[in-house]
Image (cartoon, helix red, strand yellow):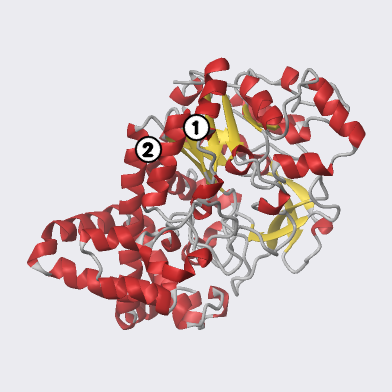
Amino acid sequence: MADKSPLFQRRTAGVLLHPTSLPCSESCWGENSEKAFGTLGKDAYHFIDLIARAGLTVWQMLPTGPTQADMSPYQSISAHAGNPDLISFDSLLEKGWITAADVQLVGEKSLSHARQQGALSFYRFIESGEGENTYQEFQTFCSQQHYWLDDFALFTALRAEFNNSSWNAWPVDLRKRNNKALEKIRIELKPAINSVLFEQFAFFTQWQALKNYANQKGISLFGDMPIFVGHDSADVWAQQHYFQLDGDGNPLTVAGVPPDYFSETGQHWGNPHYAWDVMSADGFQWWLSRLRTQLQLFDLIRIDHFRGFEAYWEIPGKSHDARLGKWVKAPGEAFLQACFEAYPGLPLVAENLGVITDEVEALRNQFELPGMLVLQFAFDGNTNNPHLPHNHTRSDVIYSGTHDNDTTVGWYNTLSEANRQQVKQYCFNSADEMPWLLIEAALASVGRMAIIPMQDFLELDGGHRMNMPGTTDKNWVWTFSWDQVDPTLAERIRQLLTAYNRLS
């Protein structure tokens, strides 16, 4: 809650950057480095050093789960697992877990093939006398995470076995999780399962090391938890009774939103809806387990599409037209009550963007959850617009833009001259150029926390956008390079944070 989380006891500022958008200087990529995405390796540590010098104390990112072919972090195959693509091979090599030959495979063959070979090297390492301590750590990890890890490892192995086909297309005894069939296939797919266990151990080990480093530098990690999970996920396959599915595992209803700012025809996300009555009956145990994992990874958690806990847009499962949906009430109050009883002081932020009703805001305020305000949404000529700085409150998290917005430079370039003048006039006719004009407006806000996308700190145009909602082309692939970082950037940010009392 806003007044209980230490992160909202003072004025702070942070940066929004997904780890995949980091530069990648992993040696394994060699000449193919331009094709590589960021990892949890040395570039992540350099980034923490940069933002620490700047005085920023929050690193916000998108969901960190394993992605599917479209690379969307919001359609993960697990609500718990880490994305193995973020694993640093160089870090594994330094620990002795894998060999130089495994690292070389990344440039020569596929990343997944290299990880499989790395897993074989890892198991040889922990079976040797040299890897005894690591073996104990590995065993502890598997034991502590068994509540999701066993099903996820089997799901991933099965998915590969059936050429990445959706689980509801698998043989019926596996689709319906017949115990004897599962026991048999676990034995047959043991090497593939072991590879997944290695990947997740490597991810969580590297993540915790990075999180500890960030925390020691006074930086909190701010995660993002999608309200829904993908249909083709370990979570839906393993616990089908929690979702609205037919007898063959197909979604009876799916999620999305009606027409809004981002799309005239609405958005069809395709995630299966929850069987909220079943979840309510056992005290929302599925959600409490999910939060348990997120709290291991993050110091603060954004709940994406918070309005779905008050009412959700229900689209018929066989329809691809989001406009055919309807609003259905959700048990938001009982759900949040259970969450805060299980985790007192749960550090949540509600993503309350889009068409938000009084009922949604009442639910958010009942649990004192900070909300989000985005300056790019502020200048529509309505002086009561909640995104305008004079309407902000202390518990709001203020953004110049989000991962779903254009960069601030890109946004400003698309405005009409009249709209540009409106922005300038509101900002005291300042001579400052974009994006710094909007960055400073966010930092000056009364909102206790201000978050600026890295693209804005780098003064990048719309060609560096992370996501265009409602489209599937060229999203989630943006990365920056270190030569884009001005040597004076950290000091410039620090001076602004000093001016607006956001330094720790």
Give the residue at x 23% y 64%.
97
Which mark, by number, is residue 88?
none
Front one among 418 and 120: 418
Quick one: 95 or 256, which is closer to the camera? 95
What residue is disc 2 on? 214
Of the 4 image quadrants, the one containing the C terminus is: top left
Query: Residue drawn 90% across and 35% down?
Result: 417
* Marks 2/1: CA–CA distance: 16 Å
Image spot of residue 363 (x, y percent): 65, 30
Q: Mark 2 falls on what kind of element?
A: helix
Tell me the kind of residue under disc 2: Ala
Which label belongs to residue 490? 1
Three-letter amino acid code at disc 1? Answer: Ala
Image quadrant where residue 427 sits: top right
Query: SS at mark 1?
Result: helix
- Pointer 2 local density, CA inside 10 Å: few below 14, some 14–19, many at least 20: many
* Numbered disc in front, either 2 or 1: 1
Total marks in image: 2
* Residue 468 percent location from the top left of the image: 72, 54
Q: Position of residue 303 (x, y in %)?
A: 57, 41
The vertical placement of 101 against 404, above or below, is below
- Residue 294 at least partly seen: yes
As drawn, is 22 to the left or to the right of 384?
A: left
